[in-house]
Image: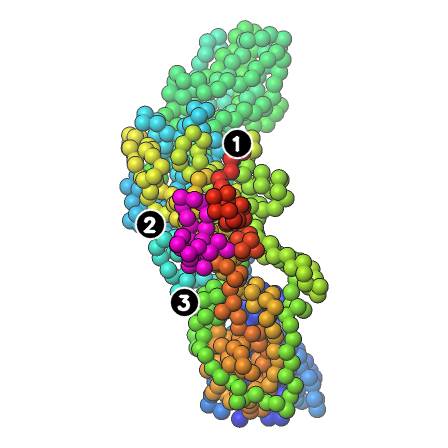
Amino acid sequence: MLRLNVSNVDLDLYQDEAVNLTIQFSDLENINSAVGSFSQTFRVPGTPKNLDLFGAVNLSDPAGVNLKTKKDAELFSGSVSILTGYVQVKAVYLQKKEYADIELVFFAGAVDLKTAIGDGMLTDLDCSAEDHDLTYNLITGSWSGVGIGPEITYGLIDKGNNWNFDAGEVPWTASNGLYLGQLTPMFQAKYVLDKIMSTAGYTFDSTFLNQTGLQTFGNIYLPGLNGATTPLTTDADQSNARAGLDADFTGSSLTTLDLVDNATGGIDDGSNWNNTTHKYTAPFTGKFALRLTYSYDQGGLTNNVAIQVYKNGSTLLFSADTGPGTAQNRLKTQLVDLEENDTIEVKGRAISGGVVIKGNDSTISGIRTSLEIIGGFPFSGFEVDVARNMPELKQIDFVTGLQKMFNLVFIPDKNREKHLLIEPYTDYIASGTDKSWTDLIDYDHDIVIKPTTDLQSKRYEWTHKAGGDFLSQSVDSSLDRVYGNYRVNDAENDFATGDKKIQTPFAPYITSLIPGSEFPIHRSLKQDGTGVDNPLPMLAYYHGLVNEFGTWYLRNDTGVEQTLTTFPSFSNYSNKLPELTSLDLNFGMETPFLTVECTPRDTLFIKYWSQYVTELYSEEARIMSLHVRLDRVELADFEFSDKIWMRGARWRVIKMTYDANVEGLVKVDCIKVLSDIAFCEDIPTSLRVSDNYLLFNGSNIANPDYGSQKCCEAYGFLYEPDKVLGTFVCRPRLVTSQPTP
C-alpha cells in the first residue's frame, strides 16, 4: 500500500489515483543540469485530516490552502521508503460545496542550489575567521601551509606596475625589495566552495574536492583580483582624510596652507590629520591616492600663484597647474607610495595685490581648495579583510563555474537532507555497482533502441570568458576565440544541428615571464601597460615554493629587504615545469608563452569531458527505452551510477518512470556504457625528450608507436615530418613569443 507522509502526517489517498514518478539523472540535452526527481500531479481527497494539514477549503474561503509553501514529504510503499523530498500544492478543486480535492506534485532529490545560495556575492561571505595581519611571517609561512595557509596564501601578479627587467622597471632589487602589499592574496577554491555551501545550509562529500597535494583540486586557488592594487584591509578606511582651506590665502613666500579637517566636507576617521601643523601622517606603509581640489585668482598675472603637495616637508610630489585668470575647483590626482609616519602637506604662494588662493567663499558654497587622501592599500601591517578581497562574482556562478570546468554531478543523499555527493561525471559513473536486469525485462512492451543523433549538436564549445589582460585580448583579437577553448565539430553528422556552448565565469590564468627574467607570473596588464581595472576571476594551480627561477627580494615588517631563493609559483598547469601527464586548467591545449617540457595532454576537456562526448557521439552510442519489473526494494537500492547488464550490453539509466500505486512495472531510459572506448584509439603516453616527439599506447623507443594524425591533433599536438625517422611524428607545441603591452 502506498503511503505519503507529509510533515509527519500520513495523508489520506485515493488508492486508485495514479502517482506517476519520474526519477531523472540529467537531461542529456542540457549537459549541465543536476539530478532531479519529480512526479506528475495527482489528487488527494479533501478529508478533514488533509484539510487540517494544508488549510481549510470551502466556498466562503476558497483561498484557504497556502499555495506558496512546500512541505517535507516521504513516499512509502508499505514500510519501504521510496523517495524523500517535499510536496507542492498545485491546485484546489471544490466539490460538493464543503470539500475539495487537493492537487499535489511531489519533488524528491532535487538540487535547488540556486535558490538556496541566492544572489549573494563572494564578497558577502563571512570569512572573518580568516582575516589576518599583513606581516612577513604570516605571508611567508602561508607558502608552506603554516599560519593562514593552505586556505589562503600569497602570489605575485603584475597589477599595473608593468615590470620589465630590460626596461629598468624591475619589481625588486637588493636595496629596493617588494613590499608585502604588492603580493596578491590567493584563496583556495575548496575553501571558497566550503564557505558557499555552508552558508546555503548544504553539506557534501567528495573524494575529488577533498583531495590535497600536487595535481589535486586542493591546490587550485582563486586570486584576490578585485581592481585593488594591494590587499584591502579591515581598517584601511581609517586612513581616509579630507582637509580644506578655511579662508582665502595670500602670501609672498611658499608656506604650508592652513588646511583643517573640520572645514566644510572634512573627513578624518583615523585622526591622521593635524589641524595645528596642517599635515597628514601616513598610518601605514602603502599606496595612497592624493586628490587636490584647488581654486585661485591671479588676474592677468603669471607665476604669482603656486600650489604644491610635499612629502616630509621637502620632497615635492606634484604641483597644481596655475595660469593667468581665475580657476575654480580644478582637480589633480596622484598615486604615491608612503612609508609609515611620512607626512603630507600642501604649500602655496600668492604674490601681489588681488592674487589669492581661494578658501571658503560666500558666493560658492563649501571649500574651494582641499586635499583628500584615499588610503586602503597598505604594503604591510593592518588586518587583511578576506571577503573584501574576493573577486566580484556571484556565489552561484562560482559553483556552476566549477561544475562546468570539472563536469561535476551533484547527487542528493537519500537519507540526509541537504547533503550531496559531488564528483566529476567520469568518477561518479565509474563508482557504480554492476547489476543484471536481463531476467526482469517485460517483453509485453516495446523495446526501442535508437541512436543519439537527436541529442547531438553540430558544434560544441567549452570555454572560459575572455580576460581583460593583454595576452587574452591578443588571442581574442587575432584568433577570434578565447584562449584555451575547445571545440567539437561533427561535420560528418547529417542529423546534428545547432551549437552548444559551455562557458565558465572565469578568465584563463595566462602565465608569462617578467621580461628579462626567468620569473613566470600572471600579468594583469592592459595593452597600454596599465593594470586591468576590474579583472575577471581566475583559477590557478599552486606549485608550492620553487627554486628554479632565481633570487628575489621582499621587505619584512620593518622595511628591511630579505633575500629569497624560493618563489611561490602559480600557473594554469598542475606542475611548475609541466610534463605530458600534468593537468591544465584550460579546456583545450594552447601554445604556451614560456618554455615547458611538454604541453600537458590532460586538459579540462580531455580529463573531464571526453568520455561524455564519446558516449554521445560514438558510432556505437545508443539510447534504449524498455520496461522492467522492479520491486520497491530494488528501486530503493538503485543508484544512477549503477551499470546494468541488459540484452548483451551494459547500460546506464538516465530516467525511470513508474506509478507508485502499481507494484513492479518501471519504464527505463538508458544510454549504452562505452567507458572501454577511448576518446581516440591512440593515446600519447610518453615524450622522447632528446628528439622532441611523443610515443603512443605505452610503447618505447625500441618498439615505437608514433600514433595517428587524427589522435595527435585531437589531443592538441602538432603532426610533423621527421627527416631522421623518415616518418611523421607527434610533437609538443613550441613556446610562442609574447606580445608586449
Kindly identify which residue carries mark 1: 740
Say which quarter of the image contains residue 672: bottom right
Kindly identify which residue carries mark 3: 205
Query: How many numbered marks does the figure carry?
Result: 3
Point out which mark residue 149 bears: 2
User: What is the secondary structure assignment of the residue under circle 1?
Assistant: loop
Residue 73 at x, y = what percent? 52, 80
Among the two numbered marks 2 and 1 on one chain, the one whose residue lies closer to the N terminus: 2
Q: Does the magenta stretch include residue 14?
A: no
Camera-nearest label, 3 or 1: 1
* Badge 1 amino acid: Thr
* Quarter of the figure that contains the C terminus: top right
Residue density around tag 3, few if under 14, some if 14–19, many if 20 or more, within 10 Å: some
Rounded to the nearest angstrom, the CA distance separating label 2 from label 3 is 22 Å
- As drawn, the residue found furthest toward the top would be 352
Q: Residue at left 60%, top 93%? A: 15
* Badge 2 amino acid: Gly
Q: Give the range drawn in magenta.
A: 685-707
User: What is the secondary structure assignment of the residue under circle 3?
Assistant: strand
Camera-nearest label, 2 or 1: 1
Among the two numbered marks 2 and 3 on one chain, the one whose residue lies closer to the N terminus: 2
Label 2–label 1 contact, CB within 8 A: no
Label 3–label 1 contact, CB within 8 A: no
Residue 205 at x, y = what percent? 41, 67
